Image (cartoon, rainbow, N blue to C red):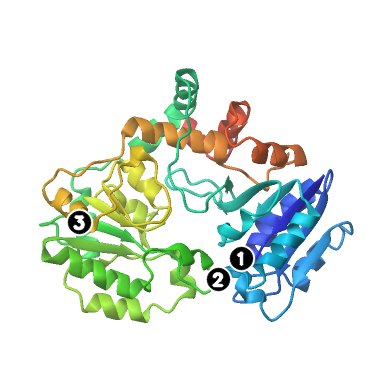
Amino acid sequence: MKVLFYLPVVTPWWFDNIIEPMIRALATRCEIYVLAPAPWRGTGISARELQRCVDLPGIHWCIMEGPDHPSTRTMPETRADMVAWVQDLAPDYVLCRSADYDTVQAFPGTVKLLMEGRLEPFATPPWWIVFQDRPLDQGILPQLSATERDALVNSIAPAWTHLHERHAARPGQRENIFARCGIAGDRPVLLVPLEYENEDNFFTMHSIRTMPNHRLVAELAARAGPDFTLVVTNHPLNDRHVDSAPLLAAIAELENVVLAPPVLGSLPATLALAKHVDGMMLGDSKSFAQGAFFGKPMLRQSRFRSGEWLKNYSDLDCFLHAVAAGEAERPSPEDALLWFAFYMANDAFDPNAADLGAGQILTHMERPVDSGRWEAGIARLRLAAPALFA
């Protein structure tokens, strides 16, 4: 049985914490091939990664080092040759860390994209991932029977109730947090969580929002006008790795925009603010999960699908009008609970689980929906966050 790892946008952290554990698990049963470019802009495979796996001599490393290897991050210049190579290899399974999902659709076998799996407020360990067919679909629910829906809802009902009690808005809390951030509370407040814009994030190739964050904020502020306050939260990795000077300069010129600090109290700013705002303005940010949890109206501008239950707006003017009128549609609370339960039970995958085996990985790829793994999925959540079920 052949398994191909196709890794054009894998970072060293992703290799160490996600890819290597899965290679080791699968190597016990499968013939492993790794197809990846040489390092460029913080992505790719180098001698460092090969050295980490030196005790696995049976791995077939196929490193693309030609002058066009940077193009594999978006659209390979040698796409036809590479696809032909993979088709000749004929892998049974392909695991991809790739922003270019068009190319991988031509690969044979069962093909899955590896995407981040941490969603607040169910803050699972940051190494949990999901297997997806499309990289940035959000909140998609499959057809489920009434029995399956009931089982899923009941499985996390205690945790759901506990989290809502933990994050319930207390009297005066909104005013206090807004005052700390310098947010005027006399008009609707819209939360704008920014996405990661460092050079190693090639998923921005899909964004409708083609401009850098500082220009995006300026455009949204101009469209919203003085009748709204926009509160911006920066992506944590932007705070670490990206020059914030352009963003700070842009916000300093805008009277209706506030930049929140990274943390408010003990919570990340986006999570602390989400329950208090009147709506959220998103692209492909995973912060949609917080909007779903708190039942907030959301604008999502994306090329990818959103679950119908989220009731996202795609038109900015319609969204602003609905929020101003107090008539904006909100995510279905019943479906929010069901989706979180399905996500945790069925989709979330821990590549560092102590009992991880090849069979678990292969079955997860073969069966996108499998009630047979739901009990183990919820048990994993209980183990990661026992206080939620106490």
Residue bearing the label numbered 3: 189
As drawn, the label of residue 18 is: none
Answer above or below: position of 240 versus 390. below
- Say whether disc 3 or disc 1 marks the residue closer to the N-terminus: 1
Which of pointers 1 and 2 lies earlier in the amino acid sequence?
Answer: 1
For disc 1, the neighbor class at 10 Å (few under 14, some 14 to 19, many from 20) is: many
Give the answer, above or below, for where 260 lies relative to 249.
Answer: above
User: Are the residues flagged by discs 1 and 2 in contact, CB closer than 8 Å?
Assistant: yes
Q: Residues under labels 3 and 1: Cα distance?
A: 36 Å
Q: Amino acid at mark 1?
A: Val
Kindly indicate whether the residue at mark 1 contacts the one at mark 3 (C-beta within 8 angstroms).
Answer: no
Disc 1 element: loop
Q: Is residue 166 visible?
A: no
Q: Is residue 92 left or right of residue 380?
A: right
- In the displayed structure, does residue 264 sit left or right of residue 202? left
At label 3, the amino acid type is: Val
Q: CA distance from mark 1 to mark 2?
A: 7 Å
Residue found at x 20% / y 74%: 254
Query: Residue at point 33% right, 74% down?
Result: 214
In the displayed structure, would residue 223 be above or below residue 20?
below
Which of the 4 image quadrants contains residue 242? bottom left
**Which residue is pictured at 36% across the width and 73% down the height?**
211
Residue at the image position 46 percent from the left and 24 percent from the top: 149
Q: Secondary structure at mark 3?
A: strand
Mark 3 or mark 1, whichever is nearer to me:
1
- Residue tagged by mark 2? 200
Q: Position of residue 352 (x, y in %)?
A: 68, 48
Compare residues 297 and 17 and report the one nearer the observer.
297
- Callout 2: SS: loop
The circle on residue 9 is: 1
Q: Position of residue 296 (x, y in %)?
A: 27, 45
Q: Residue furthest top?
A: 147
